[in-house]
Amino acid sequence: MSTDVAGGQVVGVAPRKGMRPTDISNPDYFHKVVDCQWACPAHTPVPEYIRMIAAGRYSDAYMVNWWSNVFPGILGRTCDRPCEPACRRGRVEKDPVAICRLKRVAADNKDDIRGRLPKPAKIKNGRRIALIGCGPASLTVARDLLPLGYHLVIYDADKTTGGMMRTQIPKFRLPETVLDEEVGYITDLQPEMRLGARIESMKALLAENYDAIFVGCGAPRGRELEIPGRKEAGKNIHIGIDWLSSVSFGHTTKIGRRVIVLGGGNTAMDCCRTARRLGGEEVHVVVRSGFEEMKASPWEKEDAMHEGIPIHNYLVPKEFKHTSGKLTGVLFEKVKAERDAKGRRNLVATGEPDVLMECDDVLVAVGQENAFPWIERDIGIEFDKWDMPVVDPSTMRCTHPKIFFGGDAAFGPKNIIWAVAHGHEAAISIDLLCSGNDISVRPPPHVNIASQKMGIHEWSYDNDISNDKRYKVPHAPPEKTLKDVRLEVELGFDRKLGFLEAERCLNCDVQTVFEGPKCIECDACVDICPVDCITFTANGEEKDLRTRLTAPAPNLTQDLYMADGLKTGRVMVKDEDMCLHCGLCAERCPTGAWDMQKFLFDPPQASPCQSR
């Protein structure tokens, strides 16, 4: 028993049994329910901009993206789409909403938005920040800090902007015009650009008395494949990311007729598709793992196979075959996947004869790794056993108090959207550091929640739920695209298809909000719910409640929404994993105990361009 004071006397109070009511005032609760935004590293308000696209408000939709992910047109073509596997539409149909491609719809159809962008700071704050690398992470830091009056100096070994977005993503996926436009929005904020300037010493850079240094140089080195014949046939064996860079800058314009690409990631897919456009008539991808285990995104594999590029699995390269230094083929060992006693997956030889594949050139795309020979090991930066800097994932600061990392340089190769997220966090940290504040105390997000009720049965958003399959993105014909390494393959949704795809969004940011004292427990909401996600029952521990709902709730990654205050002492429990946010419960409720309220979550940023 616990004690409480009532009327000046201490009385016994029985401890609460069962699950506690959900604290919907916690910003993270409804944020997590918006699965797509929760999964996005930059926390882009996805349903918000999709509704704008459906309404034909393309410029507004673009700006919602730009505040969060900085590169809507670029990411609308190249993002790894962590939002889409989380999409609630994927729980009722095979395919999620084409969130990534809708981002491109906003970018392709917007008006001139330059008047809505921040302007260069008229007054500088006296702080100088060095940014190493001119890729997405550094450019995000620049976007956030330049309007605040910081003087930023951007170094890059290349003489062009964009980093890996320019050097490693083929033009047929990301046109240079799109890249130049969105990078230009940031360089228009007037950072000091030192292109073609390779940093050779972190110690020397520290001696220039910058207030902070951000390292966003990517993972610039492709992994080697040291097997017999590598040196002898080296003239025709190329490291994938270096080869793509050479193609991007026009130094490489052709390749042999027969090409083998080693590796199963997105870089390998870019290599094989580029090789087809540079003269490779027979291009094969060879992977040591199974097809499903390949790191390449499913759509990247589909695009490669659509262009007539076969993918061979469970083959491990053993030797580069050559005659007098001329590459003639690659010898592979056949393997299979087996699990040991602890359930760990291993590749073991099948004992079958080796496979010889003839070729004229090989592109090695078996991974990328960081290279920090220019960072001295006696300046206070701690490195782990993989020779990576030890970086705090919340602040992006390493063990040196003035140095921050982001993008591939921080935690190894990922995607542009992760680099953007790192850049936002690092910019907050740098701003806090230069203001003399504790960088571990992070600013809160901006949150707004408002009822969408227009009348008893009318809402300010489209809540009609129906079966609706994903619409296909049109592609340019292969007979044209395979002849031009710069011709964009995906044409994107036009306005009509963009509208139809936007209509598939279930508006997961419009939350079901329940007020127990208003409820008369008529069960009308239970009867009308199309997915049986609402239950009125006696309270209990969460594990027990999950088994007693109208439809059991086995997915522990999504919460139960529980509210009390009912006259019978029962509780209302809603499975957030199943709810479609259709609003039928609120329409049917005779007392207004249910309401549909739009939840808008803006993650914190250092930049004033977040406010709207």
Image (tube, grey):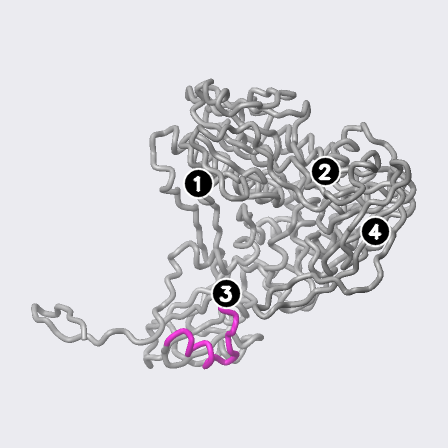
Residue 362 is situated, as x and y percent measured from the top left of the image, at: 82, 42
Cα distance, mark 2 to mark 4? 23 Å
Mark 2 or mark 3: which is in front?
2
Q: Using the image, determine if residue 343 lies above or below residue 328.
A: below
Q: Which residue occupies the foreground of this view, 498 or 338? A: 338
Rendered image: mark on residue 557: 3
Residue type highlighted by circle 2:
Ile
Which residues lie in the magenta part? Answer: 541-558
* Circle 2 residue: 241
Residue at left 77%, top 65%?
350
Asked whether residue 551 is drawn in magenta, I would say: yes
Residue 208 is situated, as x and y percent measured from the top left of the image, at: 47, 18
Which mark is first along the chain, 4 or 2? 2
Question: What is the count of numbered marks?
Answer: 4
Cα distance, mark 2 to mark 1? 29 Å
Q: Residues within 10 Å of mark 2 (few under 14, many from 20)?
A: many
Tag 4 and tag 3, C-beta contact below 8 Å: no
